[in-house]
Amino acid sequence: MTTDVQGSVTGDSIFRDPRYRAIFYQILVIALFVSFVWYVGHNTAINLEKRGIASGFNFLSQPAGFGIGIVLLMDYSSQTSTHLDVLIIGIINTLAVSISGIFLATIIGFIFGVLRLSKNWVVNKIAAVYIEVIRNIPLLVQLMFWYFAVLSVLPLTKDSIQIGENFLINNRGVSFPAIIPSNGFWLITVAFLVAIVASIFIRKWAHKRQDLTGQVFPVLWASIGLIIALPVIASLIMGNPFTVNYPEFGRFSITGGWSLEPEFLALLLGLSIYTGAFIAEIVRSGINAVSHGQTEAAHSLGLRPGITTRLVILPQALRVIVPPLTSQYLNLTKNSSLATAIGYADITALFAGTSLNQTGQAIECIMITMIFYLSISLLISMFMNWYNKRIALVER
Amino acid sequence: MSEAAMTQSDIDVAIQLIGMHKWYGEFHVLKDINLTVERGEKIVVCGPSGSGKSTMIRCINRLEEHQQGQIIVDGIELTNDVKKIDEIRREVGMVFQHFNLFPHLTVLENCTLAPIWVRKTPKAEAEEIAMKFLERVKIPEQALKYPGQLSGGQQQRVAIARSLCMNPRIMLFDEPTSALDPEMISEVLDTMISLAEEGMTMICVTHEMGFAKTVADRVIFMDEGEIIEQAPPTEFFENPQSERTQLFLSQILHNG
């Protein structure tokens, strides 16, 4: 009998000791895994060489030579722009639809989750039908529905549906007036930022005042008021330093104004309505997970329903809601790659699609695309885990 | 009713239930409840489970709605009027079987939440009051812990302190010791006894007959939604009138 470092007793043979066995098997698994990865990598390299495909990332600086439907925030020309530009446009487009989708899905989800708990029979059933129908149809089919069955059958440009004078809906998307900044617009931007900073300070001040005097200050209304009023005042001071560019009927299409393309709209609607249904169920189960006794205790202390929800129910519901909500955010971001099906120019359609086909650099393109999705997902996870930790309960 | 009579009843009567009925759907839970509780009176309500004891006291602060009859608390009649419900809830404290502390807030925050948001008390003052009551229930040293870190008995004492922070004139106890381990029951009962000695008006649903004997001015026995019998404790335990009361007492005294 021998005694090891931890002071426990070792048996006759180290092969019958579970701790040594565990170490042995772990080494074995790692060795197998490493040799497998080496084998695959080596094999691929040899095959690529045989077929004369040059690997590497030089193709990123070659001109792309194809047109892109939706370009945001940068200039793109099919002659001079490179595959790297294509990659960046793809990333921007994916982020644009994912971020707005997460935002919209969260709003839809919270509203329908709460409605699903309503005692009002009609409201409750409407929420139930929405959730059950949307959850049980494949997302790809829903995207096709929005794109081919809803947005594509809207009227032609010349017969656009008009809401008011300047809001046009047709099969080319939705157009609305654009605000073009001119000299002096900076003051409006500054006023807006000042209003946001001021709101944060008002919140702090209101907290302090409540601690000292017990008076409650309507922070939300004050902030909304500031955020609207300050930029308006700034605009008046500078004599409205912007021009409004209204959408107009051109020869073939609508010119001027800002517009949202049907591909973007279909993807945004599809993703957020689909994910919203799942979020609604998560919100409902989160609120249900808070025992009714909590509400009763709060009510018996004289707390009003609104304050009870804000200070007692939601903080507890959120700790149940946040982890599955994170998965939904990740799902939405990854599902945005279904953009390919309806021709939205996201990273998968552009870079892992067109660029890959043109250059033949399959491994590089797919790798970069995968690394992109992985990084974004990990970022979302990290943020949500941080948030979750902040609201977690302390127990024992 | 004359003006003088009103004032008189305001002073003496804390709670009045007059011909109160309640149904859960078809099920008639409370049948013609008539009860007058005087200011400073301590009442123990007992009876088999499902007899409507909890439901009755939960009607008093509108956690349950009654469908017929009158409930008058502190001279305010309980109706659908939200303002009156608020007023009554501010005057009536309640302690629950399962404590119902807010697990995401510290003990101190549990105690200051309602004073700050309902009574609009400045934080420092609310904390001072809370500490005073935490000292009364003998756990000031736990103020910064979370409910999950306390034992059941401690949690229930925090719940009592939390209610007292609102300065209620009436306290309702809904089986406050039923969820506790035996060795923790006495610490909660001691707190309740000291509260009773200070003249708090109390209605207490409990099976602790020892508590009933020492503290209660009146014991009420309920069965199948009706008040079967009410009497001072000595009379109630020594000479119960109805057969159902006798049966009930023989059962719990055997087990207890």
Image: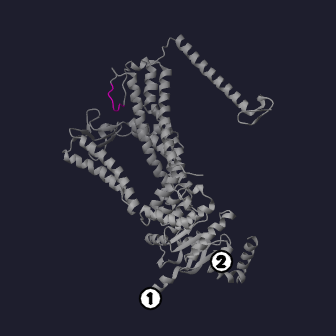
Residue B182 position in % (x across, y down) = 69, 64
Give how far apart the Cα atoms at labels 1 and 2 are: 35 Å
- Taking B256 as reference, is A227 left or right? left
**Disc 1 residue type (three-letter):** Ala
User: Residue A143: horizontal and vertical position, in percent?
Assistant: 46, 38
Q: Chain of mark 1?
A: B
For label 1, the crowd category at 10 Å Cα-Cα, with few meaning under 14, some 14 to 19 and many 20 or more, is few
Figure coloring: one colour
The residue sitting at 65% across, 74% down in the picture is B211
Which tag, 1 or 2, sits closer to the chain's start? Answer: 1
Residue B187 falls in which quadrant of the image?
bottom right
> Where is residue A210 shown, x and y percent of the image?
39, 60
Q: Main secondary structure of the magenta part?
A: loop
- Give the extent of the magenta segment: A70-76
Whether discs 1 and 2 lie on one chain: the answer is: yes
Q: Magenta includes A364?
A: no
